[in-house]
Amino acid sequence: MTAATDAPQIDARRSGRWLYIASVVLLCAWVLVPLYFLFINTLSSPETVNSFPKGFVPEFDFGSLRFFAGFQGMIDALYNSVLVAVLTMIMSILIGAPAGYALSRFDFRGKELFRMLILLTRAFPLPLLALPLAVLFIRVGLDDTVFGLALVHTTLAIPFAVLITFSLFSGIPIELEEAAWTLGCTRLGAFTKVVLPLILPGITASAIFAFVISWNEVFAAAVLTIENRTLPAFLLQSLAESPLHLKFAGGFILVVPALIFIFAVRKYLFAMWGIANR
Amino acid sequence: MKLRFELAGAVSGIAIVCSAVAAQADVLFWSTQARPAEEAQAMREVVLSGSDIAVDYQPNETGPWLTRLQAESQAGSGTIGLLGSLHGDFAALDPAMLAPLDDLGLAASSETFNELSKLGTDTMKYIPWMQASYVMAANKKALPYLPEGADIDALTYDQLIEWSANVQEGEGRPLFGFPAGPKGLKHRFFQGYLYPSYTDGVVRTFASAEAEAAWEKFLELWEHTNPASTNFSFMQEQLLSDDAWIVFDHTSRLAQAFNERPDDFVAFPAPAGPTGRGFMPVLAGLAIPATAADMESSKAVLDYMMQPETQIATLRATNFFPVVEVELPDDLPPAVQATGAAIATMSAAEDANPGLLPAGLGDQGGEFDRVFVDTFERIVLARQPIRAVLDDQKTRLNDIMQETGAPCWAPDAASEGPCPVE
């Protein structure tokens, strides 16, 4: 009797494991295959890029990358992009996390409305907002500054920062904080010593969101910066109409810094999902 | 500790940013042309490096280009020193945003172009900068399939259809390529090529019986067209990747194919229909916004751009041809030689029926194009009855003409008042 029930169980477990492995492989391929093709085509000569079928081994032709190495203003644009993205990250967390904390810990009138209103900053398309913003920036002198653009990107990133941190704070029992207060912590002390370490991974996640939002934004960047262009504003508009091999190389250049950044902060991110810091 | 460190980082970051805003004296060249990376690079390194005044060349898509320009105009102060764009983009602007340029004494050799550049005012609002056109190109592998007795330099639409059919039969797949993708310039084919060739007009004849015949012909051609054409926007890519053997496109959107494999492709004139060989020019211009900070430098750079040597350098960089009289050197890139010869043959053809750019449409230029794109999508992609679609779109076209009051342009017969849709 036991043997009869065991066999299907083992079968089910085995097929479950196969399903699990297959899903993991599929998800990895989903991300890695396009990146791999981007990599191969970046390191291929124009003829190979246009030919079919594609090879699986890069031929290490650096022509396309060399073109961009000599492309005027690339390094400056890359530097500006990183600066804007980091500023966006810092500002959206500095503004968003306290707002998320307030939403989860305090009851006040219009709380639900406030949560709705935060989302509204994403309700208007940037091409619509860019004109009045640009006029305003020119008048107050914020025009063509990295800080001005970071302000716009922060506005775009704040809804995510607020809502992510709101749910994080809500997940941490207030009793933990109360315990810290009884042991002599001030409100701020309890926050920095008890709550902050617990939600650090979540903060990282929303920081990555802010970084990526800023990194990908083109329209406002193209209108609001001129001398201090960001990399996407500088490159993306040119790439759309460039030959295929340059599209690949340019895409590669746009992707790599973001990948490096995500790798650098990944241990904070993994900690959130219960995997120990590795 | 960590938090304090991060805060310090943030503060110093902001400080760096604020100090980095230094005065820049370069003339900002704000352009929608020469946008592809290689062309932008050539503009910076070859064309503009010879200017006495330092120029910062910034190519943009039309959206940001226009928004920035409008913002500077509304704020009353600007950093843009020189504008470069297509006639249609300038026509969509309020002419008061552009400084008058008559005192420069610059002009194109074509009086038509100079008249267009006034944008309906009595002074020149932009200086014609460079020109291009649309031609046909083919892979040499398609040449054996040419119908008997057909001359590639004097094709008719019927022969083009037969040729494409032969290729499809011989190769087992349709190999005519048409730029019907999201960024493709399909509307120009209908406005400047198909309609003039079949109806000897664009606006007046929009819904005529001849127009019906033209769309039927196009449907025939579509039978032999690579169905993936709805994704094609730059036919040079499909020529190079072998997805299309016979194509129609803007000369600068074919250039890469000729420059990379000059021996594999031929360029030839657009085909002719019952009312001649319709074709139309592309005109780009240079303007100075009224808010330019340093008008003198801007004018000096504009003057530099119009010098014959600069015009030839621009031709090499962008595949757009000069608008002033120049001696063309012999060592031009293959694309320029091939497409230049095709344009020359096309213009000199006995049955040539040159059209003009739409004029007087102002900011309705995009809507005007939309009418042709929608008509194409409904007739060819959605297979709606031609007559019904034309009658339907005709009212929209008529509204646009009435609203803008634009008079007819060639090849339509001249009109008193707004061009009527008959």
Image: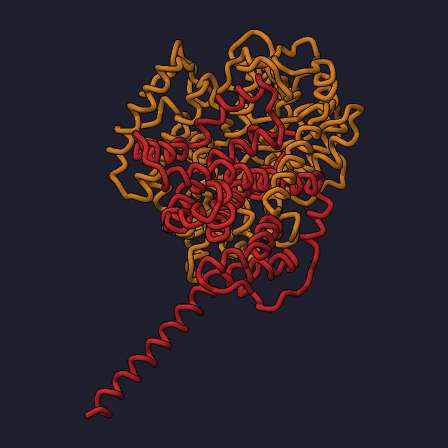
Which chain: red?
A
> Farthest residue in the left direction?
A1
Quadrant holding the N terminus of chain A: bottom left
Residue B183 point in image, percent of width and height = 47, 40
Q: Classify residue A8 by image quadrant.
A: bottom left
Residue B253 visible here:
no
A7 lies left or right of B227: left
Using residue A168 as the reference point, say whether residue B151 is left or right of it.
right
Residue at figure coordinates x 64%, y 33% from the top left:
B14
Residue B308 place in picture, x, y as percent: 75, 26
Q: Nearer the viewer, residue B20 or A221?
A: B20
Question: For the view shown, which residue lies furthest in the front direction?
Answer: A183
A8 versus B386 height, above or below = below
Viewer-closest of B2 and A27: B2
Indicate the position of residue A125 as horizontal and vertical percent values: 42, 32
| Camera sees residue A147 | yes
Q: Residue at x 44, y 20 (%)?
A: B363
Give the side of residue B55 with respect to residue A51, left or right: right
Q: How many marks?
A: 0
Quarter that holds the C terminus of chain A: bottom right
Residue B95: give x, y in percent of width and height: 53, 13
Q: Which color scheme is applied?
A: by chain
The residue under the point 80% across, 24% down is: B52
Observer-nearest residue: A9 or A245?
A9
Q: Note the chain letter of the orange one.
A: B
- Indicate whether B173 appears above or below A95: below
